Structures are given as C-alpha cells and as structure tokens.
C-alpha cells in the first residue's frame, strides 16, 4: 500500500524510525488541497501540518510504499482516530501517473506557528523527497 506524506513524515530519517519496512517511491502531489500549520501539539510545542480541501490548490509530498505493520505504527504515531483521521486519496506524479495513497488529516483548527524544530524536520524531509523549491518557500517555510 502507499502512504502520501506531506508533513514531518516527508523526513526519511523519521519515516525509517516509524516505518522500518517503508520504501520511498517518488515525489507526488495532491490536487485541490492546501497545506497549513494548525492546532497545537504539546509533543512538537506548536502547530502541526495538516491539509484542507481547497479548489485549485496543490500539496506536494512524498509517496512511500508501506507494510501493514508500518500502517499500524503510523496510526499510533498520528493518533488515529482521535487526533488525525485517515483516508485514501489519489495523488499524481510529475508525469500524471495516478496512485491511491493513504494520508492523515484532521478537521481544520486555528492556524498557528510550528516550532523551529518541527519546521526543520519538514524542510529536511522536503529536500529528501525533492519537493519543488517554490512550493517549499511558499508553503512550508
């Protein structure tokens, strides 16, 4: 199965710890959603990544192949189903190929500011997944 990562799970080091069976496939994007930092995480001491439906917007992320065991680990780390929910969405690669991938999201909360540590993990992950620089500068930094 595939997992679409757009926040801290972009980070290969973090994904390798959370999901030992994972295999990074490529960068992909999700249409008609936007990336935000919202809510508050006491673990990260600040707002955390989320995606919300938004016509005409896109969210770039990483496509990972994961095992059932990895999915259980992600469910636990993402607080599914209490903090984040998950669903299967269609993402596309640079060539228009479509993949069905599981991703995590929650109902939007108050927009907030992430901790520097959390943001650095995402920025490093964006580099790991080769996300477009313009996207990273506009949405993540």
Image (tube, rainbow, N blue to C red):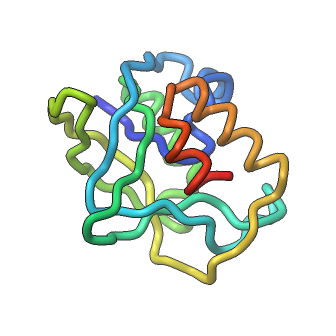
Residue located 50% across and 77% down the image? 108
Q: Residue furthest front?
A: 134
Quarter location, residue 38: bottom right
Q: Position of residue 74 (x, y in %)?
A: 52, 41
Q: How many marks?
A: 0
Quarter location, residue 47: bottom right
Say whether residue 53 is left or right of residue 82.
left
Q: Position of residue 105 (x, y in %)?
A: 44, 61
Placement of 134 over or under 80, stated as above or below: above
Q: Position of residue 111 (x, y in %)?
A: 63, 78
Locate the N terminus and report the quarter of the image it occupies.
top left
Placement of 54 over or under 109, stated as above or below: above
Q: Residue furthest bottom?
A: 110
Placement of 77 over or under 17, stated as above or below: below
Say whether residue 15 is left or right of residue 28.
right
Q: Position of residue 101 (x, y in %)?
A: 28, 40
Say whether residue 60 is left or right of residue 55.
right
Front one among 1 and 118: 118
Say whether residue 11 is left or right of residue 21.
right
Residue located 57% across and 45% down the image? 136
Q: Residue furthest left?
A: 97
Residue located 51% across and 26% down the image? 129
Residue located 62% across and 83% down the image? 110
């Amino acid at each position: 199965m595939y997992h679409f990562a757009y926040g801290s799970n972009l980070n290969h080091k973090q994904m390798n710890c959370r999901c030992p069976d994972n295999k990074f496939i490529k960068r992909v994007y999700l249409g008609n959603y936007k990336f935000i930092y919202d809510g508050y995480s006491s673990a990260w001491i600040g707002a955390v990544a989320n995606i919300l439906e938004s016509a005409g917007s896109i969210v770039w992320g990483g496509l990972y192949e994961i095992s059932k065991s990895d999915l259980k680990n992600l469910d636990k780390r993402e607080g599914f189903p209490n903090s984040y929910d998950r669903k299967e969405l269609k993402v596309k690669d640079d060539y228009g190929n479509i993949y069905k991938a599981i991703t995590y999201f929650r109902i939007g909360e108050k927009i907030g500011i992430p901790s520097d540590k959390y943001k650095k993990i995402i920025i490093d992950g964006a580099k790991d997944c080769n996300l477009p620089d313009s996207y990273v500068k506009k949405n993540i930094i």
